[in-house]
Amino acid sequence: SLSPPPSPSSDAELPPDGKRNDYDVTFVAKVDSSNLTRKPTMKWLKGKWLDLASKAGKHLKFKEAYDRNTKIYTYEMNIIKVVDGDAGGYRCEVTSKDKCDSCTFDVSVEAAASPGEHTPYCKGAAKKRSGDADEDAGELDFSALLKKREKKQEEPKEEVDVWEILKAAKPCDYEKIAFQYGITDLRGMLKRLKKMKKVEPKKSDAFIRKLDSAYSVDKGKRIQLSVELTDANAQVKWLKNGQEIKPSAKYVFESVGNKRTLTINKCNLSDDAAYECVVGEDKSFTEVFVKEPPITITKLLDDVHTVVGERVEFEVEVSEEGANVIWMKDGVEINRDTAGSKYRFKKDGKRHILIINEATKEDIGMYQVFTNGGESKAELEVEDKELEVLQSIADLTVKAAEQAVFKCEVSDEKVTGKWFKDGVEVKASDRIKMLHIGRVHKLTIDDVKPSDAGDYTFVPDGYALSLSAKLNFLEIKIDYVPRQDPPKIHLDTSGAGSKNTITVVAGNKLRLDVEITGEPAPTVCWMKGEQVRILSSNTTSDTLHLCTSVSNDEGRVRVETKKTVSSFVIEGAEKDDEGFYSITVTNPAGEDKAKLFIKVVDVPNPPENIKCMSVGEDSAMIQWDAPSFDGGVPIKGYLMERKKTGSARWTKLNFDVYESTTYEAKKMIEGVLYEMRVFAVNDIGISQPSASSKPFMPIAPTSEPTRLMVDDVTDTTCALKWRPPEKIGAGGIDGYIIEYCKEGSDQWVQANEDLVSKNIYRVKGLPAGEKMLFRVTAVNIAGRSPPATLTQAVTIREIVENPKIRLPRQLRTKLIKTVGEKINLVIPFQGKPRPIVTWFKDGAPLDDNTVGTRTSDVDSILFIRTAERRHSGKYTLSVQIENMMDSADIFIQVVEKPGPPIAIHVTDVWGFNAALEWKPPKDDGNSEIIGYMVQKSDKKTKEWFTVYEHNRRPSCTVSDLVMGNEYSFRVFSLNICGFSDDPGFSKNTAVICKTGLQYNPAPFKEQDMCRSPKFTAPLVDRSVIAGYTAAISCAVRGFPKPKITWMKNNMIIGEDPKFLMQNNQGVLTLNIRKPSKFDGGRYSCRAVNDLGQDEVECKLEVRGTQFEILFP
């Protein structure tokens, strides 16, 4: 909307006294354009649609100005020398693109009396200043110029009822009468007058019962429009939007007695229109509204569990493209006006997506999406962002000139950090390098020196977290001793037994460096248990070498030797590598041996046997078994995830480990299938996910059934009926259980073995004369509902009821059917005990194999699969209980088309006329002959033309025959089924003799009328108000008759019920019902025939109905 200055007002500026243009009036409007991208368009209107721009001249002048500083447009309208005709309602409208605003004001003109002249005085909607006639008075104050006049005594006037005068006056005199009697609110006057003129609708002579004012039908269903006529033989016409409807498979006409019915099969949006039934000069109107099927949700929302700062998308899929949906958060609607930059909406065909750019804690809640046929909801959970250490840095022991590499890995690749040595930040140099690649941070030290030893720490920026490790510098000295020294093994974990344990994570590399001394160089033997794995022996006095005896694991498990160090290496440790290992060194001076235990640890196996133990309305109890292998490290706890069945997105249920093996999952949606999976966690890491549980659905039992009552009682049975529970839930209803007990007892007996699906049940085998209590319980997958119990006991005994037939209204008059139709009559009756039912035809018991009957406790059915004329007659239904009886008569008449008339002959010929006579047909089709259709044919053309379409008598006179031609005639007979299939032909012909004059006309030269289409009247640009039916028209000529195509924005308009296309003798009209802003655009009309084509177009602008223009 526009943002004009505050305090809207309209100023009627009257010039100072003394000038000839004393009574000019000026109206000023100002528009704020600070929020507009282009110059606005201003229109001054009088009344409803009169654009005053077309009246600009000496009497009306328009001005506009623009202030660049304030960005305000000023528009003025000057009325020069106001006259009486200038009185009335005015409106100014300003538009800019899709924004519009308006303001209305009224102008009344009064006669100012002065000696010798009559001058009009304008009284506008603006406020005027007034005061004493002194020097300080405003310029508009001219009261000092008025002369004092004596007051004339007014004669008492008779009270006049102005409304009676207006009711009798012509509409063109309304404004004059309103001015005369001081009525200023012309619109209010017209509204009141319109209500007063409303009279009772004239009762139609042709209709007993007219159409209803409106009908409603679902798309694809059938609807019947029916009227009742005073004349049973009257003919009716059915019209749709003013066009006559012809009978077809879609539109079926029925005529039974004085009732006329139009049946519309398989209604679609094109059937949403105005209909009328015409009988002579009388008409009955109605309107049919076709309701579209509701938009359903085909893909539901998924729950989302995320961390702060992440992007979140809620996606839903609906059944129709272009459908509108409503998004809500915790019951508050989210739309484009309130979304701001927080939310974004996206449409992609049937998919609708709500996007949250950066999630915060404030976004936690329940999100819902609604259509007119369904809804879906999902929960958003947002957790604080935590940094997870995927790999910590480890202690290093290196020797001089070697390379030391500290490496760690964190969960967020955007995190930066700093390295510290003994609390002092490490700076990069040629020897020290720091790398950050993705989630991995490395500190590399080349050519290690003794000064590099110390504690190294990595601190991530923005997190209270640090990772530390120690760098040990190993200095090796070998002294040559000429004498022999016994060998010795130097281990950091020296000792015996299970204390020498080395733990390695499965898949990681194990490197164990063992310093060995002894002279001469000892032989090294590594063993696992009692099996020799790898041997080493000396060949020189200062170097250890590998022996030729190597195990099958060479390459993955190996020994590396360097000077006096023997390194035991396992590449990619496996579970089989776990066990006791020993190292033995020997030389001539002695032997040394050390044992150690290598323990291989891993992440645990997944949990097993995930299952749902129980469910509630929005929760479920989940249980699982611990993993079969804990990875060699105790299980710390478990992580749980769930998802909706059919979805691929899993939602975390906990961030902190959960220690128990039983978990209650909450905040689920009732009626939705879910699956669960569980991860096991130990100190090494997280296991693979378990197998998904079987799908389960949170549901709750229904509420108790409602309106339980007794329907019928006999000597041993009791029939009960009830209504479904008010609260059913997503679990639905599987059926009902009916129980009974004697009054005063609490021993309830179940009456039905299987669940009852219907809402009625007859309990049998009850003791006669006892008082019994009954109750009904609803059952679904969640269990039984609370029972609904009868408040009073029921006495089991038979109730006697007199027989009575309730004949339907349509069977109280003669039922007329055509030959071949199906007859199916359902006649209800009442009576207890069950009455004896008997059918009669024409007073005799019904004995016809082609007529079937079927009788139940409450009604009897008479059906004939294919009606024949012999089935006509009086059918009587009799119901009897002992000596009490009731009967009803039904009259059925089966009719068909009549035969042709007979004995058709020409009785007389005179001038240009011929007289015909004939006799009625031998076979009237079991129905009265109501008329005849007469046709003529001349011997030259042998083409038949209708002379009389509905002639009641068996004779007629045919006029306007052509001289010199010989005519033959044929006649069709007509009854309520239609015209006869075959006509009767005249036995003789009528010859129209020529006169004695001979006229030889000039030969006729046919003119070629073929021409290509040409629009004689183009389409004109239009601006209409939203919600008011609009029409655009043009005219075209061409032969052969061109094919007309209407288009909007170059797209063909099909059978859209919103548009009605008409062609009346070449005048083309496109009616648009209740247009909205989306109906605006460029409309074009194309005419095409075999000789060419032509096209015209126009622009249609649809304006809104809410306006806000401020006046200074």
Image (tube, rainbow, N blue to C red):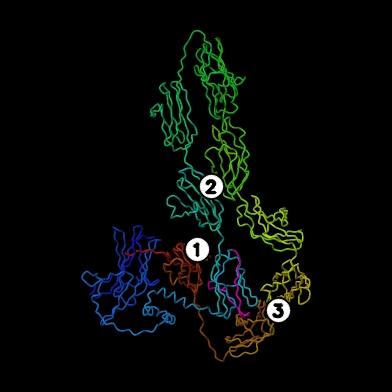
Give the Cα distance between marks 2 and 3: 73 Å
Q: Label 2 to label 1, Cα distance in Å? A: 43 Å
702 displayed left or right of 14: right
In the image, residue 437 sits, relative to residue 1051, either above or below, namely above
Identify the residue under disc 3. 926
Amino acid at the residue labelled 2: Asp
Instruction: Give the position of the C terminus as an image quadrant.
Output: bottom left
Q: Is residue 898 left or right of residue 250?
A: right
In the foreground, 1105 or 788: 788
Which stretch appears magenta?
Answer: 220-244
Task: Indicate the amino acid at tag 3.
Answer: Asn
Q: Is residue 1101 visible?
A: no
- Residue 78, horizontal then vertical, whole percent: 30, 71
Q: Mark on residue 1052?
A: 1
x and y, in percent, of residue 814 in the image: 69, 77
Which one is in front in this view, the residue at disc 2 or the one at disc 3?
2
**Mark 3, secondary structure of its residue:** loop
Type of amino acid at the residue the image marks with label 1: Ile
State left or right for residue 287 relative to residue 934.
left
Give the mark toward the camera: 2 or 1. 2
Answer few, some or many: residues within 10 Å of disc 1's Cα (few below 14, many 20 plus, some between 14 and 19).
few
Q: Quadrant of residue 531?
A: top right
Say which of marks 3 and 1 sits in front: 3
**On the image, numbered disc 2 is attached to which residue?**
303
Residue 602 in view of the camera: yes
Q: Earlier in the sequence, mark 2 or mark 3?
A: 2
Residue found at the far bottom of this picture: 996
